[in-house]
Image (cartoon, rainbow, N blue to C red):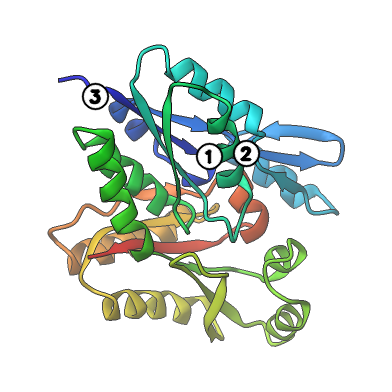
Amino acid sequence: MKRTFAVVTDSTSDLPDAWRERYDIEVVPLKVLFGEETFRDGVDMNNEEFFARLAASSKLPTTSAPSPGEFAEMYTRLAQDHDGCISIHIGRQLSATAEAARVGAESVEGFRVNVIDSGTVTMPMAFLCKVAAECSSLEEATEAVERRAPHCRVLALLDTLRYIEMGGRVNRATAMIGTMLDLKPLLLVAGGEQVKAVDRVRTRSRAIPRMIEFLEKDLPVEHVAVVHAQAPEEAERIAADLRGRLPDLEVPVGQIGCVLGTHTGPKALGVVYIKK
């Protein structure tokens, strides 16, 4: 039976292409701005091109949410062959995207759009989209996603605090201390809260086991993935470790896209999951 409602997300979900095709999920791109040049995340610039340009730039690029008009255009198109839509977006503590989606939805008459502020970013959003797409009705999908959203967790290991500090996501003093001592920060995004540091570790090799320890304290989990920015070998090693510890779960590996990569910088790693 064909699903009668649409599933929409934004590019910060880092939705795997295979899932996008299999579950027929629409993605609205955020934008990255290098000076006067604007690129749609995942459309005009791929991850490899972005990180190469980031490394060569003396000034950090900026990012922007889609406009309400871009969402309205998407919903108007979907209204032609769907009876409703669930639209799942990056947490409002991180971006104005969900609010733009709400404003855009209000301008489309006669088409029900349930906008969900996921409170999170990257692949927990992709998991929420997958959950929604496997439901049989818009009401069931909305309930299933709203129930899980507060239990999404992103535990990120950054190679440097430079990018997140320049983007205004941590204060300057914290970044300076971390940089001076060459500490590797572990940052947590949980339940719609601001990004917070949960640990600082001297070396990257010590930080990775700490990430796994943190996850193990949060078990059981329903979904788990490993994400990375230009660190595929380390990501695969972490995923292999987690598959051994959690044999009943699939542990996909995903790439951090341009918008999130602006704030994490290269070599970031993340263990992301939804608690049961």
Regarding mark 2 in the picture, which secondary structure is present there? Answer: loop
- Residue 30 numbered mark, or none: 2
Mark 1 residue type: Ser
Give how far across and how far down residue 159 sits, in percent.
Answer: 60, 69
- Residue 187 numbered mark, or none: none
Task: Give the class, few, some or many, for how many residues have Cα within 10 Å of label 3's Cα (few <14, many ≥20).
Answer: some
Quarter of the image where the C terminus is located: bottom left
Q: Earlier in the sequence, mark 1 or mark 2?
A: 1
Question: In which quadrant of the rendered view does residue 148 lie?
Answer: bottom left
Q: Is residue 96 left or right of residue 251?
A: right
Quarter of the image where the N terminus is located: top left
What's the residue at 28%, 28% (across, down)?
Answer: 22
- Along the viewing direction, whichever of 217 and 136 lies nearer the viewer: 136
Mark 3 residue type: Arg
Separation of marks 3 and 1 at Cα, in angstroms: 22 Å
Question: In which quadrant of the rendered view does residue 218 lie?
Answer: bottom left
Q: Is residue 41 left or right of residue 234?
A: right
What's the residue at 33%, 80% (across, down)?
Answer: 213
Would residue 183 be visible to someone looking at this image?
Answer: yes
Mark 2 residue type: Leu
Find disc 1 in the rendering and name its residue: 11
Q: Is residue 212 left or right of residue 90?
A: left
Task: Give the class, few, some or many, for how many residues have Cα within 10 Å of label 1's Cα (few <14, many ≥20).
Answer: many
What's the residue at 67%, 82% (across, down)?
Answer: 182
Task: Give the class, few, some or many, for how many residues have Cα within 10 Å of label 2's Cα (few <14, many ≥20).
Answer: many
Residue that protrudes farthest toward the top in the picture: 80
Find disc 3 in the rendering and name its residue: 3
Q: Is residue 202 left or right of residue 181?
A: left
Seen in the picture, residue 205 relative to 12 is either above or below; the reply is below
Separation of marks 2 and 3 at Cα, in angstroms: 26 Å
